Image (cartoon, rainbow, N blue to C red):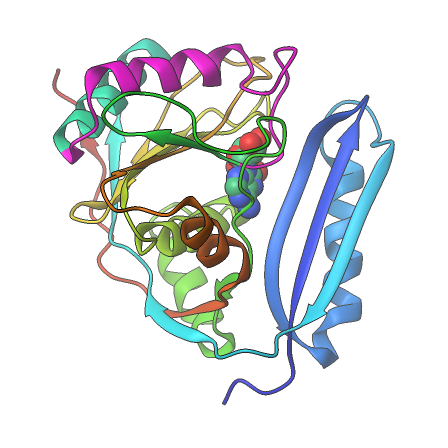
């Protein structure tokens, strides 16, 4: 029963640039503790304290969809250049054209927001041409209103921890990718964090699920972000953004978690 659920969103900025964010769904009774946890996270993210922390809470009034999280695979790579070659190969296999892969990687590496900054949300990229489609290149699209269902939190956390994937970032990225993979026209997603000490990232596509890559950037690198590649035939930007920002999705369980495998170029 999904009664009295709320979307709780946090995002923090420093020097006008995004530095931390989170999107969760919780019952009324959990909101105070969760808000405190997310504010504490914002305060400890990055080397300098945030200038502003936004925390917003909205009651969910529309139907909540229930889904399974994607399967998880891990590709172990010795360094970030091999990691990006791995990501490139996985994106090509998913159907993204080379020009679009190269454009996305160049933007992520340089800071995809105007002025070479990190975006608050994700780029939306035409999977054939590499053209960016989001209306606001500083904000992008912020995927929101997704989380593990209450009953799934403990078993999913335990399964991820047993596989050495217990960091909260993995569970949150899996929920985000799980929502993104069901978006209309979605071909694949590429992500690496802007946090200078979080070096892994992933490629997700509807057929192969969530494919972690152990290194996608060098230690200390402050650039990162997300690219959502779409098939634009008969596709509507408004419908895509409305699904990602407004449709609430709760995940009831996890698919398979495969043991890490070495990436062979
Ligand atoms: P993170 O994985 O939190 O380090 O985020 C890495 C990058 O992904 C951020 O700099 C944003 O550009 C983007 N991002 C983070 N959260 C979201 C979200 N909820 N929706 C879309 N993009 C996001």
Of residues 252 and 109, which is closer to you in this image? Answer: 109
Residue 156, by quadrant, is bottom left
What span is colored magenta in the figure?
94-121
Residue 47, position in %: x, y? 76, 22
Residue ID at (24%, 31%): 75
Residue ID at (59%, 31%): 136
Q: Is residue 111 visible?
A: yes
- Total numbered labels: 0
Q: Quadrant of ligand 1?
A: top right
Of residues 103 and 201, which is closer to you in this image? Answer: 103
* Location of residue 164 with respect to 250 vertically, above or below: above
Q: Is residue 106 magenta?
A: yes
Residue ID at (43%, 55%): 175
Residue 163, position in %: x, y? 33, 50
Residue reaching furthest to the right: 51
Q: In the shown orientation, is residue 47 left or right of residue 51?
A: left
Residue 133, position in %: x, y? 43, 31
Q: Is residue 261 magenta?
A: no
Of residues 44 and 203, which is closer to you in this image? Answer: 203
Residue 152, by quadrant, is bottom left
Q: Is residue 77 visible?
A: no
Residue ID at (36%, 14%): 103
Q: In the shown orientation, is residue 132 left or right of residue 51?
A: left
Quarter occupied by the C terminus: top left
């Amino acid at each position: 029963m999904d009664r009295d659920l709320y979307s709780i969103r946090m995002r923090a900025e420093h020097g006008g640039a995004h530095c931390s964010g989170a999107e969760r769904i919780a019952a009324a009774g959990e909101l105070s503790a969760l808000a405190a946890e997310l504010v504490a996270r914002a305060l400890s993210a990055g080397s300098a304290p945030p200038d502003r922390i936004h925390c917003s809470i909205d009651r969910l009034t529309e139907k909540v969809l229930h889904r399974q999280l994607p399967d998880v695979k891990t590709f172990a790579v010795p360094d970030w250049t091999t990691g990006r070659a791995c990501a490139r190969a996985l994106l090509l296999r998913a159907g993204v054209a080379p020009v679009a892969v190269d454009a996305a990687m160049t933007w992520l590496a340089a800071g995809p927001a105007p002025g070479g900054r990190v975006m608050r949300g994700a780029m939306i990229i035409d999977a054939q041409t590499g053209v960016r489609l989001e209306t606001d290149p500083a904000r992008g699209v912020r995927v929101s209103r997704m989380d593990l269902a209450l009953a799934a939190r403990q078993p999913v956390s335990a399964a991820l921890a047993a596989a050495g994937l217990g960091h909260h970032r993995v569970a949150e990225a899996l929920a985000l990718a799980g929502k993104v993979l069901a978006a209309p026209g979605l071909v694949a997603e590429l992500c690496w964090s802007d946090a200078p000490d979080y070096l892994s990232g992933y490629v997700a596509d509807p057929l192969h699920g969530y494919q972690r890559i152990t290194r996608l950037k060098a230690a200390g690198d402050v650039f990162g972000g997300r690219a959502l590649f779409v098939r634009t035939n008969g596709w509507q930007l408004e419908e895509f953004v409305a699904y990602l920002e407004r449709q609430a999705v709760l995940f009831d369980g996890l698919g398979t978690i495969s043991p890490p495998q070495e990436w062979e170029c």
